[in-house]
Image (cartoon, rainbow, N blue to C red):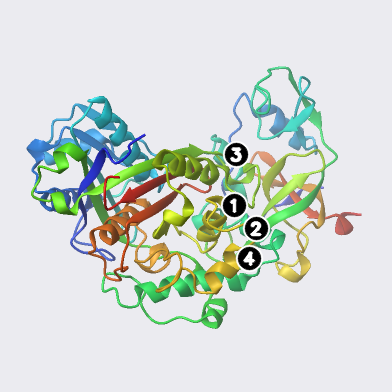
Amino acid sequence: MHGGQVAIVGAAETDTIGKRPDISVLGLHAEAARNALRDAGMSIHDVDGIATAGLYPQDISHYLGITPRWLDGTLVGGCSFMLHVRHAAAAIAAGAADVVLITHGESGRSGIGADPWVRNPASINGQFELPYGAQAPYSTFTVPALRFLHDRNMTREHLAHVAVAQRNWAANNPRAARREPLTVDAVLNAPMVAYPFTRDMCCVVTDGGGALVVTSAERAADLPSAGRAVYLLGSGESAEGAVVSQMADPGSFAAFRAAGAEAFATAGITHADVDHLMAYDAFAHLPLYMLEDLGFVGRGESGDFVAAGNTVKGGRLPMNTNGGGLSYTHSGMYGMFAIQEAVRQLRGEAVEQLPDARISFVQGVGMFFAAAGSLVLAREPR
Amino acid sequence: MSEERTTMSGFEPTPTPETAPFWDATSRGELAVQFCTACARYYFYPRPQCPNCGSVHVEWRATTGRARLVSYVINYRPLPPFDPRTPLIVALVELAEGPRMMTNIVGVAPDPDHLPLDLELSVTFVAQGAVQLPVFEPAAAAA
C-alpha cells in the first residue's frame, strides 16, 4: 500500500502553541488549515476531502468553505491523524478524493470553545473503570507501567531517562512548553502525580493545532511546493481494548505490534532504514513500549537503550526531536504534532535538524492503550 | 462486609441489561464473571458472546474472589469528586479464574513498600450509591 504514490504537500501548526486563550477549538482548526494550505501553495478550492477528529468533519469543511466529496471523522484518540493520513492515501489511490485536508485543534489548556467532557456511567468504561478513579489520563494510561518495568527488571529511573532525553531536544526549541534543563534526579524528585510517575514523566497540557494537505505524488510534482513534498511509504492501524484493564499483556500493546508490523511491511523497509522515530509520548513509559513493540530493540532493552543516549542528538535513533508530548506540546490528541515534526525533519526544516533524515517512522497511540496508528514517511518516493 | 465509601468516587455505575447480573451478584456479596461453556474460559467484562471464541453459550459463575496484584498507580492528583487528601490506589488485578479487572486496593497504606506486584488479594465490597463496587484488599488482611 502507498509505495510513495501519495504525498504530504502541506504541513503546518497553528501560529503559536501553548497558551491560546485568544482562539476557540474551531478557530485552531481553521488557523492550522489556512497555514497548511498556504504551505502547500493551495486554496480551499483545491480541497475535495476533509478529515478531522473530535469535531465533525463537515463542521470543519463548512467553516472553511470547502465542499467535500470525501469525509473521514475517524476518532480513535490521539493517533486519529495517523489513521486519517492512511485513509486519505487509500481514498486518493482509489480516486475518491484528490486533495485531502486533515485538521487538528484543541484548547486543552484554556478550554475555549471546547465540548464539555460527558462521561457515560452505563458505558463499559463508566461501569468498570471510572468508578475506581481510572478517569484522568495520569490515573489510567499509567496503570500498566509498573508491570512493564517489573517484568523487565527496569526501574523508575528508566522513565526519568525518557523525560531527560526529550528535554534535551526541547531545550533550544522556542515553541516547546518546557525547556529548562533536566536531570534524572530532578525528574525522580519532582512532585508525584501518580506513582511511579512524577510531573516530568507526564505530558504538558497545551492549546494548539496542526493540519496536513495530502495528495497524489503525481499532483505533488506539479505544485510550487514540489521540492518539499514528503512521501508516504507505508502505514498501519489497529486497536485492542475499550478499557486499559483488558490489554492481553499489560507489558506490551498488541495494537503497536500489529500497526507497526503492517507499516514496515507495506513500506518495504527494515528497522535499519529508519533515521528518525516519533513515538507518541503522553507519558514516559510509552516510548519504551513502542521501542520494544515496534521491534527497534528487544524485550527489556528499551530502558537502557534510552539511558545510553541512543535517542538523543548524535544517537543511533533520534526520537521525539521536538521534545515530544513531555516537553514540546500536548493539546490532548498529540498525534498531529508527531507527524508535523516528522515532516519538518524530512524537509530539513526542523529546529533540531538531523543531518540526513530520509525515513521517519511515526507511531501514535489512541486513548489509553486502545488504538494505534503508524506511518512511514520519506523524503523521496522510492 | 460492606463499608460506607468516603474516599472514593462519586461515579456510580449504571447497569445495563447485559451487565445487570454482575451488579446483582455484587449486591449479594459475590464477584461473578461469565464463563464460556464452549471454550471453557472465564472472561470479563460482561457481554453476551465469548471474546475468545465467539460462542453465545456462556453462563454466570461466582468466583473465589481471590486475585493477584498485576499493576497499579498511586494517584496524588485531584480527581474530583475523590477526596484529594487520600492517595488512591488504582489497580489492575487478575482473578484466580483468569480475567483481569480495574479496581482499588483498600486496607493497606498507599505506599509501594506495601504493594509488591503479585501480592495476593481478596475481594471486598464498598457501597457506591445503589451498587456494591468490588474492590480488593491484601489476602493476609482479610484472613
**CA distance separating discs 2 and 4:** 22 Å
Residue type pointed to by label 4: Pro
Kind of residue at badge 2: Phe
Position of residue A356 relative to residue A47, above or below, is below
Quarter where residue B41 is shown: top right
Residue depicted at 47% across the width and 39% down the height: A262
| Subunit under mark 1 | B
Q: Secondary structure at mark 4?
A: loop
Provide the residue designation for mark 4: B87
Label 1: state its secondary structure. loop
Q: Where is residue B132, by image quadrant?
A: top right
Instruction: Please state the horizontal and vertical placement of residue A22, each as a whole percent of the image.
Output: 19, 61
Q: For the point 45% across and 71% down, which residue is it?
A: A315
Give x and y (percent) for residue B61.
80, 29
Q: Which residue is mark 1?
A: B9
Q: Tell which subunit mark 4 falls on.
A: B
Disc number at residue A127?
3
**A173 on left or right of A128:** left
- Where does the image place residue A170, in percent across and percent down from the top left? 35, 73
Q: Are marks 3 and 2 on the same chain?
A: yes
Q: In front of the other: label 1 or label 2?
A: 2
The chain containing the residue under callout 3 comes to A
The reply to whether dot 1 and dot 4 touch (C-beta < 8 Å) is no
